[in-house]
Image: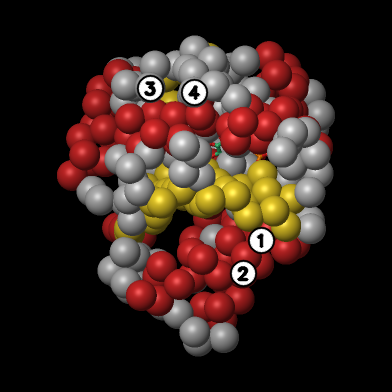
């Protein structure tokens, strides 16, 4: 049985509104909640929704803790396209979250395995109430590319050619400027979240969504692990992202 709750929406804006409300309710119900956060194009509208709610005095993030999925390797954290910068620009600098409650994996230093172990240890101590995810055109979640073990914990990964091409839009459309490696929460870390909210918009995601919802559960399509999740998994996808669904 496929336990994923799929909500099909019109477009990116509707996806952001529907998803934004779901995440806002999590924070309103438990102001001390822990959120797993993502970067990329998919969550930007949702983050705007949360910022708007904060500015309207509807919600406070003072006691919220966050853990991000991933960070590029070989890119200074101060680079405008680092995920540290992305999160500050698109969310953290606009809300009242405490710096000490924000966590992202670090790709700084020479012993990256140590960084991975440290992040996994942090995650294993935390309980993520809701993990936000985008999905790669190749079915990746976090930067867990096809073939990553479902048992993986925070790890260093080599990005696929497809992911580098897709992310070139953030680097002057020049794939050579895109980092080749990243540090990412593993599949096992992601699966430890109590619930998952996955966003997908646009035709480029149609194959991945078809495989996620209707394909076999396989490490070749990392997102399909979510079908084995023990909690709530909500996928909010727009019509274009659902255009290859058979049923
Ligand atoms: C981002 C992340 C990635 C993205 C995915 C989709 O932190 O972990 O898995 O969610 O690459 O990216 P967008 O949303 O830019 O299409």
| In front: label 2 or label 1 | 1
Residue 140 in the image, given as x and y percentages of width and height: 56, 27
Considering only vertical position in the picture, is 96 above or below 126?
below
Kindly indicate the quadrant of the structure image that contains residue 148.
top left
Residue 11 in the image, given as x and y percentages of width and height: 78, 56
**Element under disc 2:** helix
Ligand 1 has an atom within 8 Å of the beta carbon of the residue at disc 3: no
Q: Which residue is at 39% across, 29% downward?
A: 187
| In front: label 4 or label 1 | 4
Considering only vertical position in the picture, is 169 above or below 219?
below
Q: Ligand 1 shows up in which quadrant of the image?
A: top right
Q: Is residue 116 visible?
A: yes
Most foreground residue, 245 or 30: 245
| In front: label 2 or label 3 | 3
- Pointer 4 or 3: first along the chain: 3
Q: Pointer 2: what residue? A: 49
Numbered mark located on residue 150 in the image: 3
């Amino acid at each position: 049985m496929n336990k994923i709750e799929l909500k099909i929406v019109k477009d990116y804006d509707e996806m952001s509104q529907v998803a934004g409300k779901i995440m806002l309710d999590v924070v309103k119900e438990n102001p001390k909640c822990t959120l797993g956060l993502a970067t990329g194009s998919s969550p930007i509208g949702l983050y705007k929704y949360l910022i708007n709610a904060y500015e309207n005095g509807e919600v406070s993030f003072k006691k919220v803790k966050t853990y991000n999925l991933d960070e590029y390797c070989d890119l200074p954290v101060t680079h405008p396209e680092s995920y540290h910068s992305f999160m500050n620009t698109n969310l953290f600098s606009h809300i009242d979250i405490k710096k000490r409650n924000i966590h992202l994996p670090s790709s700084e230093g020479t012993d990256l395995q140590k960084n991975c172990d440290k992040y996994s240890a942090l995650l294993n101590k935390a309980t993520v109430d809701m993990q936000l995810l985008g999905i790669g055109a190749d079915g990746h979640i976090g930067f867990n590319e096809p073939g990553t073990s479902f048992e993986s914990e925070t790890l260093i990964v080599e990005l696929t050619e497809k992911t580098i091409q897709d992310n070139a839009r953030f680097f002057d459309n020049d794939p050579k400027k895109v980092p080749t490696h990243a540090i990412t929460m593993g599949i096992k870390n992601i699966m430890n979240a109590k619930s998952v909210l996955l966003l997908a918009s646009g035709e480029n995601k149609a194959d991945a969504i078809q495989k996620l919802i209707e394909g076999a559960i396989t490490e070749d399509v990392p997102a399909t692990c979510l079908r084995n999740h023990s909690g709530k998994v909500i996928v909010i996808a727009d019509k274009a992202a659902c255009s290859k669904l058979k049923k």
